[in-house]
Amino acid sequence: MTNREQRPPFFGGDMVPGSGQRQLTIDDVTNQGRYLLNDFIHERLQSDGIENVPGMEVLQEPGTPRGPPMEHIREIGRAIRFIGDDLDKDQKLQDLVSKVPPEAERQVILNVAANIFEDGIFNWGRVVALFYFAYKVCVKALDRIPLVRAIINLIVEFMREHVVRWIIERGGWEAIREYFGSSKAQIGAVFGLGLLAIGGVFIYKKCL
């Protein structure tokens, strides 16, 4: 199976042949992604020593669905944080992300998100880079929670339109746990591709 985005053979609530289980829908995986993104932002705020960290329930509107339960949610969250911690080591990335203000126009943020996948290659490193970008923008607006929510909603919207089908094809968010349990060489490959894409095209002036 390639890393390129392809329409999964079964999605939208169909039964997976031979499994007796319902295939996750786009809404399911999008809502799970929203929860994981909020969890990532909340955990990073705490680990970065930010004062007065808002609770996860504050980062989203009341009643926001979180999708079907994920069996290994702790392991999924740990894998996402692992990638995020590695992205911290790239100073060029830090410099570029710092140039995007939370007040940036909607299309600017969407263009930056799109640039992460500009060459059409999808992998878990790039998916988490999207989370990382959202965090770095949101952390500048913690005194304006409605703006934080708007940024999160925008990233979730982008995920739904451009990333979720790839995640479904891989087997859902659970697949990130299995992928990182395979080998250090594969982990390195994820970072190599993800950072290459960001380092090459993540330039704020291109998004204006």
Image: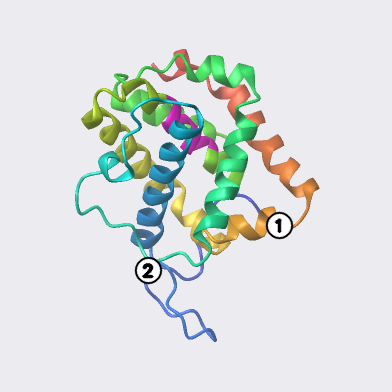
Secondary structure state at the residue bearing disc 1: loop
Give the vertical position of 133 relative to 168 (above or below): above
Please tell me how crowded label 1 is: few (under 14), some (14-19), or many (20+) other residues with Cα within 10 Å: few
Say which amino acid is labelled 1. Answer: Gly
Q: Is residue 120 visible?
A: no
Q: Percent position (x, y) of residue 131?
A: 47, 38
Residue 137 x/y as whole percent: 40, 25
Q: Which residue is mark 1?
A: 181
Q: What residue is at 32 percent from the left and 32 percent from the top?
A: 151
Give the amino acid at mark 2: Gly
Counting from the top left corner in percent of width and height, residue 36 is at 43, 49
Q: Is residue 135 magenta?
A: yes
Q: With 88 as the anchor, is 208 left or right in this view?
A: left
In the image, the segment drawn in magenta is: 129-136
Task: Compare residues 77 and 186 and report the one nearer the observer.
Answer: 77
Q: Nearer the viewer, mark 1 or mark 2?
A: 1
Left or right, 45 with reference to 105: right
Task: Report the residue at 32% width, 37% height from top.
Answer: 154
| Nearer-N-terminus badge (1/2) | 2
Give the residue at mark 2: 12
